[in-house]
Amino acid sequence: MESKDDIDYAKAYQSSKLILDYMYKDYTREIERRKSVETRIPILVTIATFFGGLLLVNNTFDFTKILNNGKGIIYILIMLQGISCICLLASIIIFLSLLMSKPYKSVNTDGFLEMGPQGECEGLVAYDLIEAYKECTDYNKKINDKKHNMNTTGVLLLMISVVTYVILKLIYICI
């Protein structure tokens, strides 16, 4: 069995540079994915806020007209109004929580700078960087996946809110 001193690091870690390039690209893909989600959030908050104002201001119902057409319809209108408001509020909360998310990890290069120019073999340093990029990429990927799922849920709730509001208005117009 070879001891650590007998290992030829240049040969043992020969493919590390190639793998490092791939890991770096994977790491930067997660950073780009983060930017993609984060640039959509303010737009969605603006849309949800606008719709919230519309929902609150444009809800004047003539209850005598509703009661003349039957008492059962009022419960449907109240239910649709409630669903629309609850979904809108939930989507706004989700979008705002996305703005206050966990920090991302980045590669700590302090240890590499301490080595100096005559440091270890290039392949071994590349391998250490691979491990650092993998750890950061895995952590950032989990955060991005969670953000993406929350963003999708928020958009879905906003769409449900808009659709129920449109149905509510159509029912009221048809009465």
Image (cartoon, grey):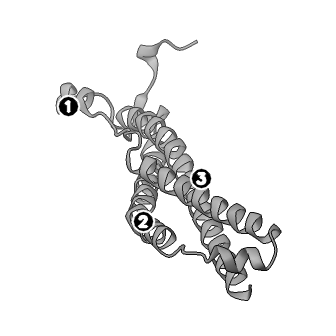
Mark 2 or 1 closer to N-term? Answer: 2
Relative image position of residue 70 (x, y in whole percent): 82, 74
Instruction: Please state which of the two labelled residues, at mark 2 or mark 3, is closer to the viewer.
Output: 2
Helix, strand or loop under label 1: helix
- In the rendered view, would you say 129 is above or below 68? above
Task: Name the residue tied to disc 2.
Answer: 49
Q: Amino acid at mark 1?
A: Leu
Which residue is painted at 49% across and 32% down in the image?
12
What distance separates the C-alpha of mark 2 from that of mark 3? 21 Å
What distance separates the C-alpha of mark 3 from that of mark 1? 38 Å
Relative image position of residue 23 (x, y in whole percent): 46, 48
Please indicate whether residue 120 sits to the left or right of residue 48 in the image: left
Q: Amino acid at mark 3?
A: Asn
Mark 3 or 1 closer to N-term? Answer: 1
Residue that extends furthest to the bottom in the rendered view of this protein: 174
Task: Name the residue tied to disc 1.
Answer: 113
Task: Name the residue tied to disc 3.
Answer: 149
Relative image position of residue 130 (x, y in whole percent): 44, 39
Helix, strand or loop under label 3: helix
Q: Residues within 10 Å of mark 1 (few under 14, many from 20)?
A: few
Q: Quadrant of residue 107?
A: top left
Which residue is painted at 38% across and 45% down in the image?
100
